[in-house]
Image (cartoon, rainbow, N blue to C red):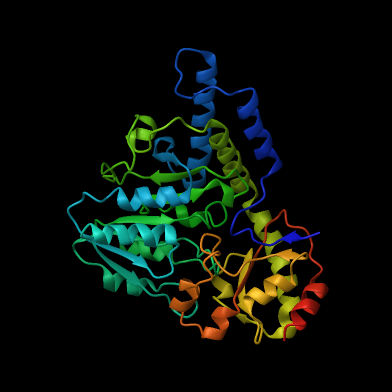
Amino acid sequence: MTIYLDCNATTPMEFKVREAVLKYITTEFGNAGSRTHEFGARAKKAVQNARDQIAEMLAAKREEVIFTSGATESNNLAILGLRDYNKKHIISTQIEHKAVLEPLIEMEKLGFEVTLVPPNKAGWVEPDAINEAIREETLLVSVMHVNNETGVIQPIADIATLLAEHEAFFHVDAAQGFGKEISTLRNPRIDMISASAHKIYGPKGIGALIVRRRGYQKVPLKPLMYGGGQERKLRPGTLAVPLIVGFGVAAALALKHSEERANFCRVYRDKLLKALAVFNPVIHGDLERCLPHVINFSIAGVDSEAAMLALKGIVAISNGSACTSSSYTPSHVLKAMGLADENIQGALRMSWCHLTEAVDWDEVVERLNRLR
């Protein structure tokens, strides 16, 4: 049996989440926009309950939760939604997900100037580098919460402090950290937060953009689509009630069980590192700053494609982001960190969760040994 070790790409669904989704697919199938009967009223109530569950995770308000199809759409809305603003400078980082980098390219086409700050060799962006890039005309600072390839947590709280006296909007792509590293995202200086349900044991196809008010100031986002007044006129279309309910349940479970899940993952990582020690692997990213459920590493003389093929049937792993894995291009994240070419070519990512089964690490080591 193959053990799934690619939880940074997507996670298995929690049983309670699955039950909730099925209920709102089969029996409670009402449209939350239907106001003339009890089916619609119950659907609307379920959606509002999910908003509350997600908002509680972030110490936000119900009305600040805007449902989208996932973090990719949320990132697009947070960035491209500012396309008509008069300030024209944006700061981000070289290690962002393509769901941030590609909208930034589109903003450049619209006349915006984008500054991409490089990471240090440990995989995180120095707050001072963000501070040096800030200008009076800076409109937006967009920095990911946790890197999807290395698992390295970025200094979001420090950046929020730097922005305390600046008017720039602060956006955080929290696809990898939402529901796992909780306290940071509760910082009220973060104006916008992107999240996806399928990264926290919920269904695919649903996410959210949390848009906080800063005092009386509202982020002046413009919609990307038109055709209805749903989601405060920022994201039109019939709400996917079953997926939204599943997202809410997943968020509530993550908040309740975050510490025990993290402890499970730390123990799992310790066993993995002990097994890999025979290879003296190069770890990509500071483990002291990584979430406990992921490790990115390379082994001297072992190519990542060959390793994934050799481990087929034992473990399912990746060599980078799921969104770019079909392109076989070198990781822009690891390149930005200044890794040697052989380490980039050999980079493997293993990511697990509290639902992950035990692996026969002796067999993994044996198969990797054959490649050296």
Residue 33 sits in quarter: top left
**Residue in the picture at 68% in, 44% down:** 14
Q: Quadrant of the N terminus?
A: bottom right
Looking at this view, is 46 or 263 the one in front? Answer: 46
Question: Is residue 352 shown to the viewer in this render?
Answer: yes
**Residue in the picture at 73% in, 57% down:** 356
**Residue in the picture at 75% in, 71% down:** 271
Work out which residue is located at the far top of the displayed protein and give it: 36
Residue 137 sits in quarter: bottom left
Name the spot of residue 125 as percent of width and height, x first.
41, 72
Locate residue 153 relative to residue 26 in the image: left or right.
Answer: left
Question: Is residue 164 shown to the viewer in this render?
Answer: no
Name the spot of residue 311 as percent of width and height, x first.
74, 70
**Residue in the picture at 65% in, 86% down:** 300
Looking at this view, is 321 or 327 the one in front? Answer: 327
Name the spot of residue 154 as percent of width and height, x first.
46, 66
Q: Is residue 284 above or below residue 7?
A: below
